[in-house]
Image (cartoon, helix red, strand yellow):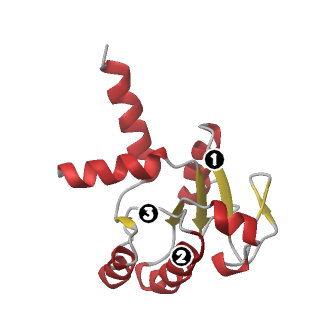
Amino acid sequence: MSAKVLEEVEKALESRTVAIVGLSRNPEKDSYKVTEFLKSKGYRIIPINPNVEEILGERAYPSLKDLPEDLKASIEVVNIFRRSEDVPPVVEEAVEIRKKYGRLKAIWMQEGVVNEEAAQAAKEAGLIVIMDRCIMKERLKREEMLEFKL
C-alpha cells in the first residue's frame, strides 16, 4: 500500500460517523458483521437500506438523500456494500451532501467493490476514495500496529 493510500485510510478511520449503504439485517452477512464491529469501536453508524426500518438498534433510511438534515450534516464516511455497478448513484448523493455540508470526508468501497468512474467523481468533489478494502480489516491492522508500538 502506497504512503498516500495509507494516509487516506488513516484519515477515513479517524472519522466517527459512518453511513453504511447496503447494510443487511442478516447477521451472517459481511455488511452486518463489519457494521457491528464499527459500532463496538464507538463509531456512530447510520444504516442505509430501503427494505428495513432498523438494523443494530439504529433507524435505517432508504438512501442517503432520505436522511434528515442533521444526519446528512454529520456523516464523515460513506461505506458502500453494493455491487460495483450500483455505486455511481450512491456517490452522486454523497457528493451532494459534501457540497451542502462539507463534513463528508471519504467514500469507502468495501472489498470487491470497484468503480473507477464513481471514484473519479468523488475525488473531483474533494473526497478521499478507498476501493476494494474492508474498513474493519483496516481498523484491525491499525490496532495491531499500535499494540506493537511500545
The amino acid pointed to by label 1 is Glu
Residue position marked by numbered label 3 in the rendering: 108
Which mark identifies residue 36? Answer: 1
Q: How many marks?
A: 3
Which mark identifies residue 94? Answer: 2
Mark before the other along the chain sequence, 2 or 1: 1
The amino acid pointed to by label 3 is Trp
Q: CA distance from mark 2 to mark 1?
A: 22 Å
Which mark identifies residue 52? Answer: none
Rendered residue at 37%/67% (across/down): 112
Rendered residue at 26%/55% (across/down): 5
Q: Could you say where residue 30 lies in the image, as x and y percent from the top left?
A: 53, 56
Say if residue 135 shows up in the picture. yes
Which quadrant of the figure has residue 88? Answer: bottom left
Nearer to us: label 3 or label 2: 2
Crowd class of label 3 (few under 14; some 14 to 19; many from 20; radius 10 Å) = many
Crowd class of label 1 (few under 14; some 14 to 19; many from 20; radius 10 Å) = some
Relative placement, left or right, of 38 versus 127 is right
Nearer to us: label 3 or label 1: 3
Circles 2 and 1: CB atoms closer than 8 Å: no
Which residue is farthest top?
Answer: 150
Q: Could you say where residue 13 lies in the image, as x and y percent from the top left?
A: 45, 47
Q: Could you say where residue 105 lies in the image, as x and y percent from the top left?
A: 46, 61
Camera-nearest residue between 25 and 90 = 90
Circles 3 and 1: CB atoms closer than 8 Å: no
Say if residue 24 shows up in the picture. no
Circles 3 and 2: CB atoms closer than 8 Å: no
Rendered residue at 55%/51% (across/down): 34
Relative placement, left or right, of 32 versus 140 is right
